[in-house]
Amino acid sequence: MPKIYSSADLPGKMSDYGGGVVQPGHLKCDGTAYTKVGVYWDLWWALSDGGVSNPWDTADGQGAPGAGQFRVPICTRKVTVGSGGAGTGTLANTVGSAGGAETHVLTTAELASHDHGPGNLSTGSESADHTHVAGAHTHNILIRTVGGSSNNGGDGTVRNQFNENFDSTTTGASLVHSGVGQTGTFTDAGDVYTPDGNISTGGISASHSHIVNAGFTGSAGADTAHNNIQPTVVVTKQIRY
């Protein structure tokens, strides 16, 4: 049977001590293994709830002690918290459980919900694949006919301005147009139609959109761990035996 102790001398009682060396009758709470029999028997009895099981034997990833031995609590670089309540994936709720970390690198799921500005996205070049939507418009083009029969204006004179979807490489094809004083179809194989003057879509405000196949808004940060420790002072954690 274990001895009867006063509350001040109760085996298994943990305390903080301001000195660097534990007081007499105490062991440092550093997970060290000790022999069950002899002077430390009462401590083992207290930690193992009457010889049932000592939760500190494998606490914080430690290997099981040798035959006839037990481990004291390991509190190195740790604060203590009361047992019970609802355990979490970070810290369970039973005596001997350990968890938490001094530093932590945030994951994407842990970031606060936020938006990114548009940044500088590009389709890569003017020739990159993209589409225009809405903003229908016309091109105002001056047409000059060169060559061809006289009935098609083969004298090389400048014809009137008109609205037309115009392919500047069209040669000998049908070009249907309408404009001030000019209607009809040019069909002579010798005719070449070239733009003469400025081509405009009516200004840079014409409504359209670009489909961006790839790009990003840039990045910031260094993925370094941040401090995760509350304001703390270091003392000697000791346990009575």
Image (cartoon, grey):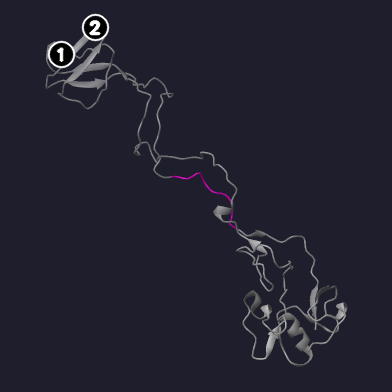
Image point 19% across, 20% down: which residue? 175
Residue at the top extreme?
181
Residue 173: image location, x then y, percent: 15, 23
- Quadrant assignment for the C terminus: bottom right
Type of residue at label 1?
Answer: Asn
Q: In the figure, residue 22 lies in which quadrant?
A: bottom right
Residue 58: image location, x then y, percent: 64, 79
Which residue is more in the foreground, 134 or 195? 134
Q: Mark yes or no: residue 19 visible.
A: yes
- Up-down: is 83 above or below 12? above
**For this view, does 93 lie left or right of residue 185?**
right
Query: Which disc, if any, is residue 181?
Result: 2
Q: Residues within 10 Å of mark 1 (few under 14, many from 20)?
A: some
Q: Main secondary structure of the magenta part?
A: loop
Q: Mark yes or no: residue 158 visible.
A: no
Image point 67% across, 78% down: which residue? 55
Residue at the bottom extreme?
38
Type of residue at label 2?
Answer: Gly
Pick whichever of labels 2 and 1 is earlier in the sequence.
Answer: 1
Which residue is more in the foreground, 104 or 71? 71
Q: Tag 1's secondary structure?
A: helix
Which residue is more in the foreground, 173 or 62? 62
Image point 82% across, 74% down: which residue? 15
Magenta span contains residue 216: yes
Q: Are marks 2 and 1 in contact (CB under 8 Å)?
A: no
Which residue is more in the foreground, 152 or 231? 231
Q: Which residue is mark 1?
A: 152
- Quadrant assignment for the N terminus: bottom right
Q: Tag 2's secondary structure?
A: loop
Q: Which residues are magenta?
A: 215-223
- Up-down: is 150 above or below 14? above
